[in-house]
Image (cartoon, rainbow, N blue to C red):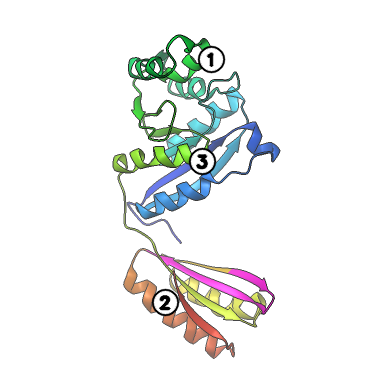
Amino acid sequence: MDRAEGAVTAAVLIIGDEILSGRTQDTNLRDIARYLGAHGIDLCEARTVPDVHEEIVAALNALRTRYDYVITTGGIGPTHDDITADAVAAAFGVELHEHPDILAMMTARWGDELNAARRRMARVPDGGELVNNPVQGPPGFTIGNVFVLAGVPQIMRGMLQDVGPRLKGGAVVVARTVRVEGSGEGAIAAPLEAVAKAHPAMSLGSYPFYEAGGYGSNLVLRGRDPDEVEATVHELIAALQAAGIANITRVEG
């Protein structure tokens, strides 16, 4: 799908050695993609970087200049390898400070047990604003077009609820699925390509499946114009039938 003029774009920066090592399976990207899609924002790129200061800074600077928004996950905890706040401050060329609201919140929770490690979570870049954390622990923060969220999925999803109202959304993408059973991608490639070329503003993708009862492909059509999406579904079904393909079922969503 060609990026529409005026489309709102975003990227996700996943931070953490544990993701790259395979010890932790990332689910945040999926949740963020769905959340942004519901707000009419195109998630155009996702990167995963290790807990290395220079690499986080380089990736963040590349993404924030290219897209309308960047959401980062991970690296804002109390341990030595939680360096996201430091890297974000460096990327924007500002200093870090301990936010008084976070300190007050943490003091109320931990009292005399508010040690140096926990105080690391109170650091926010100069000019940054807080992102509410309704689950547990300190909030995230935002600066410029960057939103810095936790890596723990439940906490990240909670923080997202405070991100949405701050985003400038666009037209929501409509998706429809045409299911073809008993035909491989080689058989459906030509009609699918012909319809895709006729509708460059839309995205048409083939996603094969192999099940106990047989095989086939789910053909997913995505676009911002509901009328065009609906017309293209009918056009695709007709093109498949003209190519001798049977067992075609329309599936909503």
Q: Is residue 209 left or right of residue 192?
A: right
- The answer to whether residue 234 shows anywhere in this view is yes
Which residue has dot 3 on it? 153
Which residue has dot 2 on it? 232
* Residue 149 occupies quadrant: top left
- Residue 101, image x and y in percent? 33, 18
Say whether residue 191 is magenta.
Answer: no
- Residue 172, image x and y in percent? 34, 58
Q: Give the mark nearest the N terminus, 1 or 2.
A: 1
In the image, which residues are magenta?
Answer: 207-223
Q: Residue at x 46, y 46 (%)?
A: 32
Discs 1, 2 touching: Cβ within 8 Å: no
Q: CA distance from mark 1 to mark 2?
A: 56 Å
Which residue has dot 1 on it? 117
Q: Residue 94, labelled with which disc? A: none
- Residue 106, image x and y in percent? 41, 18
Amino acid carrying mark 3 in the image: Pro
120 in relation to 202, above or below: above
Closer to the camera, 247 or 54? 247
Mark 2 residue element: helix
